[in-house]
Image (cartoon, coloured by chain):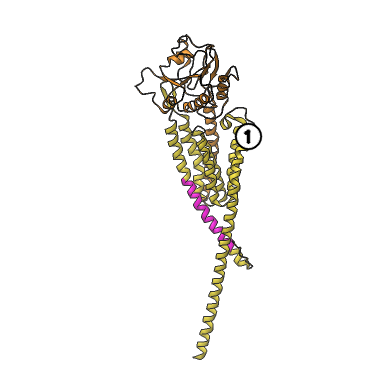
Chain colours: A yellow, B orange
Amino acid sequence: MSSIVIENPDVAARAEELRNEQLTNRRVRIDRMFAGLMLLQYAAGIIGALVVSPYAWQGKEKVIHMHVWVAVLGGAGITLLPLLMAIFKPGTTITRHVIAASQMLWSALLIHLTGGRIETHFHVFGSLAFLAFYLDWGVILTATIVVAADHFLRGVFWPESVYGIANAEWWRFLEHAAWVAFEDVFLVWSILLGQREAGQAAERQAAIEHLSEQEQLKTAALEMALAEMQGATA
Amino acid sequence: MSRSRIVTVVLIAAGIVWTSTVVAAFSAIRRFESTPGLSADAHATWPASSRVPRATGASTLVMLIHPQCSCSRASIKELEAIIDQSPRSMRTYVLVYRPADAKAGWENTDVYRAATGLRRAQVIVDVDGSEAKRFGGFTSGQTYLYDGDGRLRFTGGITSLRGHEGLNRGRVDVIRIANAQETSATHPVFGCAITSKTTTRGARP
């Protein structure tokens, strides 16, 4: 796609204004989408815990399983802040970074609730793709840091939970993070492309608005000249 | 107080709740998943009073399971991997706990069905955990491996954490012992309690 060269500073400023307006509108909608997704994940976490592991047993006695409490209370805690941010501060930078971090924490929680099932790790990759809708590569960076920090800290203090064996090498978190980085490269590329396209669309709209204004001024001048001629003839 | 100030206060409070919940929830999970169950009072040799027939001249593996224990799904999965990588001569038993006063079919859960679906393994319903007591086991997932002469070579669990599938030291050790690459090992066991230590002590052979 060819770019438009705008020399008029007023038109350039208007293009920037339009671009920011479009991005903000988009990000408000994505915040709302994530608010809904957070509630959906909360419900899914509770239902999953109730279905997969409702009780812990001691002989024939049963008690509510720890996973159910964690899904109810921990899930509520993780959901609360991004939900309120999406309601009261939609479209702001801090809101989408809080959402990114919370979404990754949901991935970690769901992985635990499903007993570390490898299939649940797909939630990480799906979430990164959803976060790319923001057209802000910083959000992808925040999410990646949370995933890497989670793996690094667990790899150091609780290696069995990540690698299955207690004496895993400390650097193995890099192997896991590398798969996330692999996806990140393509997501960041698509975000930069999306930002450029949004900028070009805004420039086109600003140029059209400018041309339209000029045409309206010409028409007004012509109408004025015509009226003067008609007045002189009369 | 203005609306924006109220919103700011609410968001700061939510931030504090968010941070403390994250720390508390993941700490609770860590404590729950990494706390092993009671280790077996395992005998050095096959318990003479057991009614489970031991293989002579080949290894015999025994696993105790609480069928309602969701964490034991992982133990059954790991057992499947062990059977696949051990000599075909190894005999495997899964002893499924059922309380004496439980209704018929109480033990028929997905864990039980997974155990019955294992190749080269025999499932035995262990009423009131009487066999578990003879083997000195307390925790679901407790695994024993005896050699061809009835000597205990492995005792412990075969998952890395409570309810977690995947590569772990217990599984690796059992496979190595079954293939005569290692002589003996122990590993923590993670799962629900089948019997308590007080009820077991009097029943030992």
Residue at position x 53%, y 38% from top? Answer: A121
Q: Please state the horizontal and vertical placement of residue B130, each as a whole percent of the image.
A: 43, 14
> Pointer 1: residues within 10 angstroms few (<14), some, or many (20+)?
some
B126 is within the stretch colored magenta? no
SS at mark 1?
helix
Q: Main secondary structure of the magenta part?
A: helix
Q: Quadrant of the N terminus of chain A?
A: bottom right
A157 and B11: which one is in front?
A157
Q: Which residue position is annotated with label 1?
A: A172
Q: Please state the horizontal and vertical placement of residue A183, each as a whole percent of the image.
A: 58, 45
In which quarter of the view is residue A194 placed? Answer: bottom right
Disc 1 sits on a residue from what chain?
A: A
B61 and B169: which one is in front?
B61
Residue A68 visible to an observer of this rendering: yes
The image shows a total of numbered marks equal to 1
Q: Please state the horizontal and vertical placement of residue A161, each as a whole percent of the image.
A: 56, 31
In which quarter of the view is residue A3 placed? Answer: bottom right
B18 and A4: which one is in front?
A4
In the displayed structure, A221 sits above or below B201; it is below
Q: Please state the horizontal and vertical placement of residue A181, each as a whole percent of the image.
A: 61, 43
Residue at position x 61%, y 39% from top? Answer: A177
Segment colored magenta: A15-36
Residue A102 visible to an observer of this rendering: no
Residue occupying the far bottom of the picture:
A234
Q: Amino acid at mark 1?
A: Arg
A28 is within the stretch colored magenta? yes
